[in-house]
Structures are given as C-alpha cells and as structure tokens.
Image: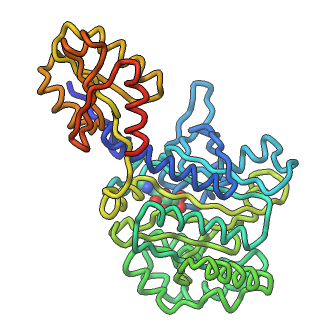
Amino acid sequence: MEISGPRGTHDILPDESALWYYIETNLRQMAELYGYSEVRLPIFEHTELFERGVGDSTDIVQKEMYTFEDRGKRSLTLRPEGTASCARAFIEHKVYNQAQPTKWYYIGPMFRYDRPQAGRYRQFHQFGVEAFGSQDPNVDAEVIAILVRIVEKLGIKNAELHLNTVGCPDCRPLYRERLLQYLTPFAGELCNDCQQRLNKNPLRVLDCKTTHCREVVKDHPTLHSYLCERCGQHFEQVKSMLSSYKVDFVLDSQLVRGLDYYTRTAFELLIPDLGAQAAVGGGGRYDGLIEECGGPPTPGIGFAMGLERLLLAARKQASQAWKIPPVMEVFVAVADKEYDRDACLLLDRIRQAGIKADKDYLDRSLKAQMKYAGKNEARLVVVIGEDEIKNDCYILRDMKAKEQQDVPSSQIIDRIKSILVTS
Ligand code: AMP
C-alpha cells in the first residue's frame, strides 16, 4: 500500500529547498541587521502555555491545536505559533534580569488543524521576531520596518501594510462597552462564531472574515476617539516614524486582537496577489503577555510571517530574479571510464578548496556527461582524457562563455577559482 503524506503537510524537495534556503538566509540576515539573535525552542510545549499565551477564547486554542497526551499522561501541544514559547523561555531563563531589550528571532514549523487550501496548511513555517523589555514606539516602528523590508528585499511588490492601535487596559474597556452597544442590535445577524465573540471578546467581531459580519460592522465606532493620552501619543509616534522611514501604511480600524494582553500597535502585511490567504505576516504589541505567562511586567512586541505564503508571492512575482546558487559549480567529466579514479582524486582536491563539485556515477558517455553538467547549471567542466593524463593537464570548459583552455594540473584549482570569482 502506498502511504502519502498527511493532509495539510507538504514535502519540500531539493528543487524547492534551494528557494527556501535563499529566503531563510535573507530572513536571518535581515533580523541580524536589526540586532535580533536566533532562539531555537521546542516544537511542543505544555498545552496550558498556549491556553494562556495565545488565549483560550481564540480560534487557535478552541479549534486548531494538535494536542495529545504523552506516555506520562501530560497534555502537550505541537506549537501553533512562536510567541508563547518565546515568552516562556524569556521567563524560565530569567532573561528579564539581563540588559534589555531582548531581541529574538525564530524560524521553524508550526502546526494548526485548519482546513487546508492554497496558502493554508496544517504544518507550515513561520519566521518571527520578538522584542521584549521596551515600550518605546520606535521599537514598534523598527519591528514593522523589518517585516516590510524583508518583502521589499525579496523583490515582492504591491504589499500593503495595515496599521491600527487597540489601546490598553485603561482605555479599551470604555470602547468595548460602546462597541457592544453598537453590535447588540445586530446580534441575531452575526455568524455563530461572532455570536460567541460578542460576549467574550467583542473586538474580534471586527476582524471576522465572513461577508455578512463585515457588512454589519461597516459603520462601527472606532477606538481612536477613546484612546487615552499615552496610547494616542504612542500611535502618533509609530506613524510618524514609519512615515520617516518611507514605509506606507493604511489605517485599518478593523484590525484587532481581542485579548487583554494585546496593547496599542497592531499590524498586518497583505499581498493582494495571494487572493483569499493574502496575509503574509502580522503582529503587534503585547505589553501584558509576559505577566500573563507568569513573569514580571515586561512590555513586548513582535510579528510572525508565513514562509509558504512568502514563497507563493515570490513565485508569482519575483523568484526568477533571485540568485539561487547552483548545486554544482564544477563538473569533472571523463573521456573514458579508465580515468574515473583520476576524476575522484581531482574532485577531492576541488572540494577541499571549498568549491561545489561533482562527477558522473552512471557510466555516461562524454556527451551525456556534458549535458548532465549543463542541466545542473555547472559553470565549469573539467575534462580528463588520454592526452590530459599523459601531459598532466586538463581541459577546462567555461559553460557560460562557451570557451575552453588547457590548464596544467598544478594550476587547475587557482584557474577554477579565478573564473568563479568573476561569475
Ligand atoms: P498568525 O500567527 O495567525 O498571526 O499568522 C502569521 C502568519 O503566519 C500569517 O500571516 C500567515 O502568513 C501565516 N500562517 C498562519 N496560519 C497559517 C497556515 N495554516 N498555513 C500557512 N500559513 C499560515
């Protein structure tokens, strides 16, 4: 019986993993440019962490977690996102006692039991950054700038940054009451999920994606006129900094996160080309999260972006322009099988010099070897034949320039290097 991969998972085969490697290298470089260091955290955590850190009224916790009991009867969950684990590690290792801010990034698989479709998987990958320990609005602007600059650097156009503020526990309750007053007369028209949200978490009704709920909330009161002075100033500073960075944004009063530990800035980056799953990344400030997870009061802000969606967008628009390194730089071909041992030894010299090289292992003819080298985009082919062995030299063919030259064995590595440097 043939066994296929579980629904909602996908294999990344070598053709594609080159693109992944390229994207991941760019993500790491970008995060490090801004002073963020990598954390590597477990793929599973105690279920309670996500109930508290993501919020037990959220769709993720209510419907989407891969939760299981291990052999010791503990309830564990495959991580559905990265922020809760970062908060846990920040508290567990008392990182709050070190000089702040703490700037971390992570990259890796996440798991959500959701209905799979283009751009939505059950195992997917996120890259995220978290900055703990500072309330400075310039940190908000920095975090948002990273998200935008990544997409720009990968050559993806038309990304749209949506920005909002969700206030703080001082100013939000008044707004919550006002919103509830507005929504209550429409209660019967809302979708089932929103009817539940209405009491637990009315701000989240604003974020519902169903057409009818969107219609209902069209004229909702906005939080902006209820903001306390400090939240108002914070938002002004974030917007002003983003404008100075020439990062365009759209104010979007429906972009919300309903839980108490989310504060102030909320943002999302959309790539309309992606259709129904247009959100490529999103995040916000969560000044109450570390406390919620059992740590000392510590402000924080971060975002997570989905790599599958980033890749989809890149594939539609930009990936041809990326410089993906070829699998091999040099191919060593033999005119006859009897020079195979010489080919292996030369290959070893080339590889030891730090150059990606390979040879034939299927007894192909010389012509077929050249074709194989071309298919693998090898820039150079070294040919070993009878004359070459006799004269202790090789034919070095530049596949791009379509030229070849005889090179003495003692000079072959230097000659290869000098051509590769200029390519
Ligand atoms: P979230 O943690 O829900 O704010 O998601 C952050 C980003 O992760 C989204 O903007 C998506 O790009 C990506 N993402 C979330 N859920 C999925 C999924 N099921 N499949 C693929 N990507 C996802």
Query: Is the C terminus in the top left, top right, bottom left or bottom right quadrant?
Result: top left
Residue 31 location (% of width, % of height) = 61, 54
Task: Using the image, determine if residue 137 lies above or below residue 57.
Answer: below
- At horizontal 30% and vertical 11% (from top left) the residue drawn is 342
Q: Quadrant of residue 304?
A: bottom right
Question: Viewed as shown, does residue 339 lie left or right of 347?
Answer: left
Q: Position of residue 299 (x, y in %)?
A: 77, 63
For the residue pair 401 and 158, the one nearer the viewer reads as 401
Residue depicted at x 25% and y 25%: 395
| Residue 88 screen position, x and y as percent | 72, 46
Asked where in the image residue 35 lies, by quadrant, the reply is: bottom right
Q: Residue at x 41, y 46 (%)?
A: 20
Question: Which of the pair 33/328 is nearer the observer?
Answer: 328
Q: Is residue 221 visible?
A: yes
Residue 16 left/right relative to 2: right
**In screen coordinates, is 19 left or right of 283?**
left
In this rendered view, identify the residue nearer to me: 50 or 329: 329
* Above or below: residue 162 compared with residue 343: below
Residue at horizontal 50%, vertical 92%? 219
- Number of marks in the image? 0
Where's residue 338, x and y in %?
20, 7
The colouring scheme, among rainbow, by chain, secondary structure or one colour, is rainbow
